[in-house]
Image (cartoon, helix red, strand yellow):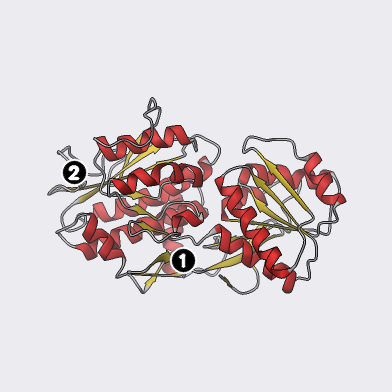
Amino acid sequence: MSKLLLPVSWLGIVLLLGCGETDSSGHEGSVNVNGVTDTEIVIGAHTDLTGPIAIWGTGIANGARMRFGEANDAGGVHGRQIRYILEDAQYQVPRAVSAANKLINKDKILAMVMAIGTPTNNAVMVQQFRDGVPNLFPVTRARSMVEPFQKLMFSQMGVYYEEMRAAVRYFIEEKGATTPCVIYQDTDYGQEVLDGVEDQAAEMGVTIAARSAHQPTESEFTAAIIRMRDAGCDLVLMGTVHRDTILVLEAARKADWTGVAWVGNEAAYGQVIADQESGSGEGYYAFVPLALRYADEDLSPELREWFDRYQNRYGEYPGLPAMIGYRGADLTVRAFEIAGRELNRDSLVAAIETIDDYRDLFGYELQYGPNDHKGVGSSALSQIQNGRWVTVGKSISY
């Protein structure tokens, strides 16, 4: 039995998602080595349901559960029910390693589907690929998800590094910024953002006036704000998530620092930032693979019906994580349908590589091929205006 790094005690939470509230298959049955039986397809992911990025984990889980439940309610895929096992790793590498060990070696999953986090995916992937387990649509935009090319890896969200390079280029060339700074988590994710900013600035002959790194648990950003303000920054690129983004923007507000463009990505893109009572999120930008939609917008009948169903099911309006979770699950179902009754890991990979004309429910297009597993190559630029997210400018390609 293969192992993923050193085993640690498993403290995860298991959710079996699908047609029912727990076991989507409605029955128990032995699972073969590839996660496929005559009646069931077993997939799973390590995620975060109770940790620092639980807003992402729960949203992804809800969106995925909704789509897999629809497939199961319609009779399954080629007669098989989908069972989706989620392990709560709380965005911690040791827990993710332990969770992946369980999913691969005990649950015998067919594929990892929408596993969350850059450091957690990076810690798991090497052994996962040695075990032949595909990593489908991980919830991270790290370069390691697409470079070097890996036959068992498929993305649906683009790449932080390329996106931040595009952000630097756009705000300097199109918005007239002259003095960029960067604030980022001291993690694999934050390093991706920093690398993109530094490489693009160097290519353009622009000096980065200040850099500020912090731990994901950091709560005090006054010193970092003063340092960047005193450096004359008029553009701050951010490698942060919801929590620290809110704290950074609030610290800037308290320091009365204005006249600066704050630019992040979908890791810190949610209504919670726009809803800050102090208004500290006003004007903040984010590059995102999908733009939030609101109930009072002119939505298509299909999209409005989806939003209503989601709200009725979960008692809340769907955010970006739910949209991405639903899309990732829909892509997975599509691949199962294409692969046919003879579903296995090889046929699953081959099936995704044929999806070259996919358009999601939200109006975005993705395409894959035998030598292209990225799925997307552009991002929408969104900004908080009057307490809500508004898509501004054109789609930014990279």
Question: Which quarter shows the C terminus?
Answer: bottom right
- Residues packed near mark 1 inside 10 Å, few (<14), some (14 to 19) or many (20 plus): some
- Helix, strand or loop at disc 2? loop
Task: In this rendered view, identify the residue nearer to me: 45 or 164.
Answer: 164
Give the amino acid type for the residue marked by disc 2 in the picture: Val
Give the amino acid type for the residue marked by disc 1 in the picture: Phe
Q: State the mark number for residue 362.
A: 1
Q: Which residue is mark 2?
A: 33
Can you name the residue that lies furthest to the left here? 38
Q: Quadrant of residue 366?
A: bottom left
Can you say whether 127 is above or below 343 in the image?
Answer: above
- Residues packed near mark 2 inside 10 Å, few (<14), some (14 to 19) or many (20 plus): some
**Residue 138 percent location from the top left of the image:** 42, 52
The answer to whether residue 315 is seen in the rendering is no
Task: In this rendered view, identify the residue nearer to me: 172 or 87.
Answer: 172
Separation (CA) of disc 2 from disc 1: 36 Å
Q: Residue at x 68, y 70 (%)?
A: 170
